[in-house]
């Protein structure tokens, strides 16, 4: 059960004369129609309270009329930080997705994270942009990140911002077993990290962090995993490895996006090898941010055609990883590498590798053509010197 379901809603004593159970039904119906000379906040509170009335008729009349309240009246209510979270949630779920009022709810600090997670799933580009930039909520609620990660309107740039922020989760002390019975999960603790500009100060072992001068509950610190997902393994046989990977794949398949993201940052080699191929871009690219990822893994990934173009693009745009000659060769030969990047790396290839690209049937034709021209230029230059 979520926080909103457990939340109590009460009205001020002065408004009980309109909504109390001892108030005559005709009077409650009149109030449910919004036909009361009350200030905007009191009017919305009364009609909302009656939308929860035990009497179905009163409830239906109130629900029908609350959405007919003029926007001019609702604006002041939905932007008021003293408005009850349940009222804000009601309007978030019942107003049109593109309503101008939705943004007021998103920007209201009183709005519950559960409501923001719902809004993060809406096809409203403006809301998605606002939410993806709210670091406090991203740290406080993994559900919001889950929703953003599944929303097609969350652009690659937004996803990258989210990952860069959550990357701090990877900068931690080694994982330790939780203070629990054997076989139970582990709690991954956080070491202190000093970052510049609007980055949270994460202190080891704390469930709250300081962000923008505010103490914020760190929901990510509560995500824990079984030790087998964190410790690299050695296998006695190929069969044992395949069985373990199948078992691991099932476990990961049941995880939420946020759980996969954190595992991508702190998990073992086996977890990373599966998560790098995850269909969700935010999960797959998070693997590249893991402090545990090795050069040999990057070499293997740069060669793979089973990972997404986003993963290949990030490797291609990394100065650190593309210092590796074999990574450059792999990227040129990988059909998922952006053509412009592949052609750029041709200049660094030795003649032997360049010749193989020039004959390849597995890379885009523009890359093959560019390789042939470059090889010819080199050959002509070499002959002219002799």
Image: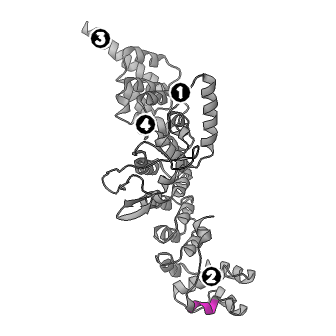
Q: Which of disc 3 and disc 1 is earlier in sequence? A: 1
Mark 4 neighbour density, 10 Å: few (under 14) some (14–19) many (20 or more): some
SS assignment at label 2 = helix
Up/down of 22 relative to 349, above or below: below
Say which residue label 2 marks: 49
Label 1 or label 2, whichever lies nearer to me, is 1
SS assignment at label 4 = loop
Give how far apart the Cα atoms at labels 4 and 2 are.
53 Å
Label 2 or label 3, whichever lies nearer to me, is 2
Say which residue label 4 marks: 292
Q: Which mark is residue 382?
A: 3
Q: Say whether marks 1 and 3 touch (CB < 8 Å).
A: no
Which corner quadrant of the image does residue 320 belong to? top left
Mark 3 neighbour density, 10 Å: few (under 14) some (14–19) many (20 or more): few
Give how far apart the Cα atoms at labels 2 and 3 are.
85 Å
Say which residue label 1 marks: 234
Which corner quadrant of the image does residue 32 belong to? bottom right
Horizontal and vertical percent position of residue 338: 45, 34
* Magenta stretch secondary structure, dominant: helix
Horizontal and vertical percent position of residue 321: 38, 32
Q: Which residues are magenta?
A: 14-18
Q: Is residue 380 left or right of residue 285?
A: left
């Amino acid at each position: 059960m979520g926080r909103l379901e457990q939340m109590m809603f009460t009205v001020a004593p002065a408004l009980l004369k309109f909504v109390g159970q001892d108030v005559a039904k005709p009077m409650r119906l009149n109030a449910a129609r919004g036909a009361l000379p009350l200030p905007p906040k009191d009017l919305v509170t009364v009609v909302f309270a009656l939308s929860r009335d035990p009497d179905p008729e009163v409830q239906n009349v109130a629900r029908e009329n609350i959405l007919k309240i003029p926007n001019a009246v609702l604006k002041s209510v939905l932007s008021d930080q003293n408005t009850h979270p349940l009222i804000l949630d009601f309007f978030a779920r019942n107003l049109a997705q593109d309503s101008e009022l939705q943004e007021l709810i998103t920007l209201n600090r009183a709005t519950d994270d559960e409501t923001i997670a719902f809004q993060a799933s809406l096809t409203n580009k403006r809301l998605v942009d606002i939410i993806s930039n709210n670091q406090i909520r991203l740290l406080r609620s993994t559900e919001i990140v889950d929703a953003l990660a599944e929303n097609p309107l969350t652009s690659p740039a937004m996803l990258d911002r989210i990952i860069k922020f959550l990357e701090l989760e990877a900068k931690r002390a080694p994982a330790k077993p939780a203070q629990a019975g054997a076989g139970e999960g582990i709690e991954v603790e956080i070491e202190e990290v000093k970052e510049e500009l609007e980055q949270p100060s994460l202190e080891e072992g704390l469930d709250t962090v300081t962000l923008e001068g505010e103490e914020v509950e760190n929901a990510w610190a509560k995500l824990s995993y079984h030790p087998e997902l964190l410790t690299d393994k050695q296998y006695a046989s190929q069969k044992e490895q395949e069985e373990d990977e199948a078992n691991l794949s099932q476990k990961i398949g049941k995880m939420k996006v946020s759980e996969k993201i954190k595992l991508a940052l702190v998990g073992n080699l086996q977890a990373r090898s599966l998560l790098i191929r995850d269909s969700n871009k935010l999960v797959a690219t998070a693997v590249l941010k893991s402090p545990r990822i090795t050069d040999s893994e990057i070499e293997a990934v740069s060669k793979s055609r089973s990972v997404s173009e986003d993963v290949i693009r990030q490797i291609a745009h990394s100065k650190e990883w593309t210092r590796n000659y074999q990574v450059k060769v792999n990227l040129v030969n990988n059909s998922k590498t952006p053509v412009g990047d592949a052609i750029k790396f041709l200049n660094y290839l030795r003649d032997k590798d360049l010749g193989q690209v020039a004959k390849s049937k597995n890379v885009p034709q523009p890359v093959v053509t560019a390789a042939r021209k470059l090889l010819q230029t080199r050959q002509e230059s070499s002959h002219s010197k002799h």
